[in-house]
Image (spheres, helix red, strand yellow):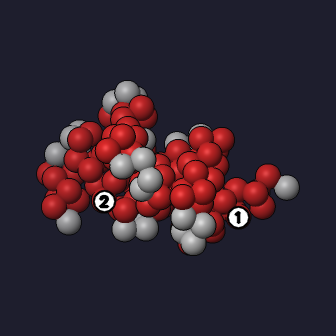
Amino acid sequence: EVYEDITFASADDDEAYLLLGHTRLLSGEYEKAEQAFMNAIHIDPANREEIPRLYENILIENPQDDAALSHMGFAYWILDQRDDAKEAFEAALEINPENLEAKTALDRIRASAQ
């Protein structure tokens, strides 16, 4: 809610939109995350590169974090980088075959490719 308030008060605050997007992505609100990320990119196109970077940094600290890989997969999916999303979901499942988010997302990717 704090980030929503900031974006309402200052509609050109791309950092607030990035943080709002990450917060929503982490809570599973993927459509709302996409809206926030697209607003951040609209304000500054360089933000497209920043979105997956948060998860990349988490993975530097803990390369076995399957949740971070799943979140990175969703970030790539939102950015329409389907191959990168697929790789992230597959890597998450290699670490934890029971990762339901990655499993469901990968099933959707495979179904849409057919």
Q: Residues within 10 Å of mark 2 (few under 14, many from 20)?
A: some
Please identify the quadrant where the C terminus is shown.
bottom right
Q: Quadrant of residue 1?
A: bottom left
Q: Residues within 10 Å of mark 1 (few under 14, many from 20)?
A: some
Q: In this orientation, does residue 56 appear?
A: yes
Front of the two marks 2 and 1: 1
User: Residue 60, position in %: x, y?
Assistant: 36, 40
User: In the current view of this chain or complex, which residue is farthest to the right?
Assistant: 114
Residue identifier under label 1: 107
Position of 34 relative to 12 (above/below): below
Residue 29's x, y, as percent?
42, 66
Can you identify the residue that label 2 sits on?
Answer: 23
Q: Which mark is first along the chain, 1 or 2?
A: 2
Residue 10, position in %: x, y? 17, 45
| Image side of residue 114 versus residue 60, left or right | right
Circle 2 SS class: helix
Residue located at (58% from left, 51% from top):
91
Q: What amino acid does circle 2 point to?
A: Thr
| Residue 78 visible within the image | no
Q: Which quadrant of the view contains residue 97?
A: bottom right
Looking at this view, name the residue that lies furthest to the top. 46
